[in-house]
Image: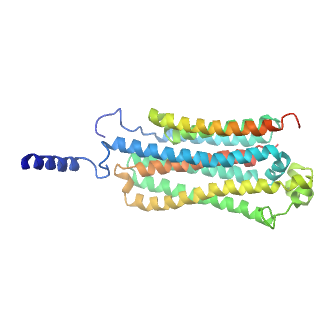
Amino acid sequence: MPDSSENAHGAALAAHEQHPSYLRHHFNSVEQQADASNFAMWLFLLTEVMFFGGLFTAYLVYRNWYYPAFVSGSHQLNVVWGATNTVVLIFSSFTMAMGVWCAQTRRRRGLVLCLTLTFILGLSFLGIKTIEYREKIEKHHVPGFHYSLQSFLDPQSDPEVYAEYHDKPLAPDMARHTELYFSLYFLMTGMHALHMIIGIAILGFMILRARAGTYTAGHVTFVENFGLYWHFVDIIWIYLFALLYLISRH
Amino acid sequence: MNGHSEHARHIVGPGVYLVILFALLLGTALTVWASYVDLGLWNPVIALAIATTKAVLVVLFFMHVWYSSKLTKLTIFSGIFMFLVLISMTLADYISRAWGSW
């Protein structure tokens, strides 16, 4: 009896030495472990779909109800900034995807470069968003006590926007619903920006670990799953850009 | 890595990523251009169709779903389908509530 238990112990030790250190004991293989964590990441992203989906639904319902207010509100957004930010995010998704490839093919310097570029592009996005938010603050288009209806009751008082769209003045009871448009604008872009900030913070942490070679020794699950998160945030922006900036443009 | 190629994770290379990058940039240019053309009711439809095309490209290739297991594909599809059921039922209600009175 002592013999067989000793043997079993020896076999367990041998098995332990055979598998890579990052394989947890409750998984049979590295592939199974990677599939499981990948699957879990997708489940998390689906809950995020439902979360942002609620915001999108609220936006569509209110846009349907207060259509003129939402069109005038949308005309206050700058399509050039919005499009620039879309391009910035698409490039950041590309550099992130390249980062995943570098990790998978064990290119440490390439990975650090890709993560750093993604980090910089993420910060650029937030910088442009700040310029846009500042303009809303200056025009008193942030919902609350200081909210101003002037751009909507008297469009000609807002010459830049008037020159482009020639909006007709809204009736006061419709004009006040532009505040709802901006509430949803700040809620949706703000939640998106929060996701970006969290992503950028994690990227900073990953750059440090990537420099130490953590992700280029065969265990790339963390980089892959973060890539999924980053691409998801990109997708949310693709829809925000279409819904907030574009569909009331013509 | 350890011989069974059927389970080895598919590595998507820079070539695919570059093609998708250009497709996404093209889609962005297209949707901005389309938003300035007055197509009436079709403007939001086209904007959302282009956005969805871009999103599908990101999901399939940047997020590797094209190469992933049936379980992952089915789960993602079910999740999106559930979301579409919820949003279409809600919108059907709100849009039809005042039917004919406008």
The quadrant where residue B44 appears: top right
**Residue A72 location in percent, x, y?**
84, 51
Q: Looking at the image, how many numbered discs can be counted on the residues?
A: 0
Q: In this orientation, does residue A13 appear?
A: yes
**Residue A22 location in percent, x, y?**
32, 52
The quadrant where residue B36 appears: top right
In the displayed structure, B8 sits above or below A133; it is above
Q: Identify the residue at horizontal 34%, vertical 52% (top origin).
A: A217
Q: Identify the residue at horizontal 42%, vertical 40% (top origin).
A: B11
Q: In this orientation, does residue A77 appear?
A: no
Q: Nearer the viewer, residue A193 or B92?
A: B92
**Residue A209 location in percent, x, y?**
41, 60
Q: Nearer the viewer, residue A221 or B93?
A: B93
Residue A136 lies left or right of residue A51; in this view the side is right
Residue A94 lies left or right of residue B51; in this view the side is left
Q: Identify the residue at horizontal 44%, vertical 34% (top origin).
A: B69
**Residue A16 location in percent, x, y?**
22, 49
Residue A86 lies left or right of residue A142; in this view the side is left
Color encoding of the figure? rainbow
Q: Identify the residue at horizontal 56%, vertical 59% (top origin).
A: A120
Q: Nearer the viewer, residue A243 or A9?
A: A9
Q: Nearer the viewer, residue A127 or A10?
A: A10
Quarter of the picture containing the C terminus of chain A is top right
